[in-house]
Amino acid sequence: MSETAQTIERLVLEQFRTCSGNNRMTATDDFFNTGGDSFTAVQAATAIAALTGRDPDPSLLFAHRTARALACRLVEDPPATGAAGGNG
């Protein structure tokens, strides 16, 4: 896993924990099986976008349900221009 993917994974996991209220969640735990729901998925996606400069649609959280899986998916997308963490 690249350094960028590890950084994004850490940020995603932090937001998954915050939004679900489950501080024991690991990078391989299913967000929805450990306290997350559709409302907290929107909250997490919004926070992840602000922190990473990548703009995950909340539906991505349903397809990539762990912090690790979502981070690997997000690393494929370049940061949005002008967003936090972006180059513009």
Image: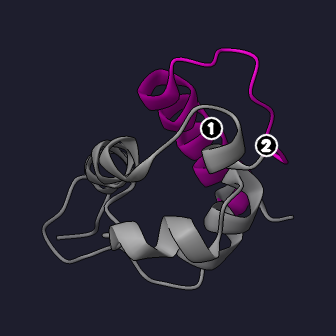
- Disc 2 residue type? Ala
Residue at (25% x, 76% y) in the render = 80
What is the image's colouring? one colour
x, y percentage for residue 12? Answer: 55, 45
Looking at the rendered structure, the secondary structure element under dot 1 is: helix
* Residue 3 vs residue 34, the one in the foreground: 34
What's the magenta bit mostly, secondary-structure-wise? helix
Vertical side of 30 occupied by 57: above or below: below
Q: Which residue is mark 2?
A: 27
Q: Which residue is mark 1?
A: 13
Residue at 18% over, 62% down: 83
User: At x 47% / y 23%, what residue is drawn?
Assistant: 18
- Res 87 → quadrant: bottom left
Amino acid type, label 1:
Leu
Question: Over which residues does the magenta segment extend?
Answer: 5-29
Compared across the picture, whether 73 is left or right of 55 comes to: right
Left or right? Give the position of 66 relative to 78: right
- Contact? badges 2 and 1 (CB < 8 Å): yes
Q: Position of residue 44 (x, y in %)?
A: 38, 45
